[in-house]
Image (cartoon, rainbow, N blue to C red):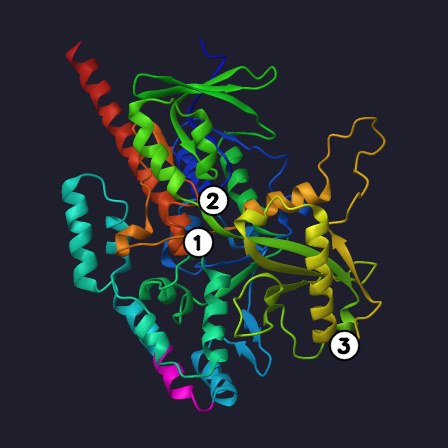
Amino acid sequence: MAEQYSDILILGTDLAGLITGAFLAKRGLAVTVLNFDKDVSLEKKNIQPNLITHLESRLFKSILGRLSILDHELNIVSRLEVPYQAVLPRHRIDVFRDRERLYRELKREFPQDFENVKAFYETMDHFDATLDAEKLQELILPKGLRARWRFKKFVKTTGLDQRVSDLVARLGADREVQAFFEGQLKLLSKTHSENPFTYQIAKSLSNENCVLFEVKGGIGHLKKLFLDKIEAYNGRVKNEAQVEKVEFEKRRVKGVQLGGFEGMIGCRYALWNDEIRGLTQFLPKTWRTRRLRARIEGVKPRFYHFSIQYQLDPNVIPMGMRENVILIGDPEVELTGTNYLHLNVYHPAQNDPDGQAFLTVSYLLDAERLHEPSSYFDEIHGRIAQSLKRLMPFSDGRIRLHFPLEGKASESSETLFSMEKSDFEIFRENATANPIYEVHPKDFGGLFPLSHRTPYKNLLLTSPELLAALGFEGKFLLGLKTIDEIWNEVEVGRRKAIKQRKVE
């Protein structure tokens, strides 16, 4: 018999599952979140890209309203007038939210190609404005033959299968123009495709969707907001949870066996809310899971975002440099490694006695580089330091690497056997939390290789890979779709129980 029981058991802390958990906890279901880490808001765990989109979307605002999340609870989120700045060898562009101001920037920097660039933006805006987003949200991740037929018909009639290759080819011969767009897409997208669909770019670059928000302290603080809501509605959060086994019985998940003295937690529904590849070690090796396993194996990261942090004197930051910078070294070379950097300047509270600022630098590397030795990354970080000196000429001697540091003493060094992770362990874990998935879709539906349903009736997927092509909007949407799936079944069960009582 299970020592504990929960209606909803959430394994992992991706945003989609936390949104689901907060709603269902508010509706009276018992919710337990298993956080595999110590704390989602730890400082070092949040040294990673902290820009998110779609916080002004109708979808996200409805989530905040229905969970009674007030404006003062969102003080960790800063709305940027200039979301980011693109710096290329011969150009510097402030990417304003206001289209007219952006057009003036582009006309100054790319006078010969301006009309084509402007037409490209207008095409993105028009495509995004005319698409019935609510209908797409309703039809996506179809279940059953009829639903799949409706989804395919919607894709065909709305032109979602249109790709951007022809549009990009007309942008002009200047490689820096194309690198400017490619760099933006790499910053904002969670998928990599050699020839993406127009919709993918429209969701990133159209007038409304290009609004970016900076989460102070990192993405973990936004997750913490929903974790706090779950606990406020009498849910539970177990940090540093170690899952030893997922118990299956026929076509259902019976519960989860935890390590140590935690015992087993039985559940009515289980949500796998972490990287999808982690699920395979717990799935039974049966014919029932063969297809799911094959699909999971097909979802692989192409790149990882690696992030380091410097501490610097704010006075060395050049006039006009924005809080977020896309730094492109050579537009003719692939935008990875030290050739493509995302810089984020973070200023602590005004009353900070040190008066220092922090500069987080993120870069893309092939996924196979994840487990390279620290010496490999030291060489990369040395080249990054040289790029920063060129960008900030007066920073010599006034900027120092803050994270990761090789052989840095643990915070609990007074113990004989420290349980704290080293900087480079956390550095790699941060990277695995920020993958860019490679997709080769034949059509628009191929962007979503996995469904949130599984062969087990009460095991649902809210993993970040499912709707990665939609960015943060995909996380919000997946959370709401999962709520509907579970709540509809709960309501059916209640009605059956009431009917049975009346009969008796």
Q: Percent x, y for residue 49? A: 58, 56
Q: Of callouts 3 and 1, which one flags the residue occurring earlier in the amino acid sequence?
A: 3
Which numbered dot is residue 178? none
Image point (48%, 42%), residue name: 14
Q: Of callouts 3 and 2, which one flags the residue occurring earlier in the amino acid sequence?
A: 2
3 and 1 marks in contact (CB < 8 Å): no
Decide if residue 348 is in sight here. Answer: no
Indicate left or right for 281 with 359 as reference.
left
Indicate left or right for 198 with 393 as reference.
left
1 and 2 marks in contact (CB < 8 Å): yes
Decide if residue 414 is in sight here. Answer: yes
Is residue 116 in the magenta section?
A: yes
Q: Which stretch did the figure color magenta?
A: 111-121
Front-lying residue, 351 or 298? 298
Is residue 311 in the magenta section?
A: no
Which amino acid, mark 1? Phe
Residue on which the image places disc 1: 472
Q: Of callouts 1 and 2, which one flags the residue occurring earlier in the amino acid sequence?
A: 2
Front-lying residue, 54 or 252? 252
Q: Percent x, y for residue 441? A: 31, 54
Cα–Cα span, label 1 and label 2: 9 Å
Cα–Cα span, label 3 and label 1: 36 Å
Which amino acid, mark 3? Pro
Vertical placement of residue 419 versus 444, above or below: above
Which numbered dot is residue 393? 3
**Within 10 angstroms of label 2, few (less than 14), some, or many (20 or more) residues?**
many
Which amino acid, mark 2? Leu
Residue on which the image places disc 2: 15
Q: Closer to us: mark 3 or mark 2?
A: 3
Image point (34%, 72%), residue name: 124
Q: Which quadrant, please, contains the C terminus?
A: top left
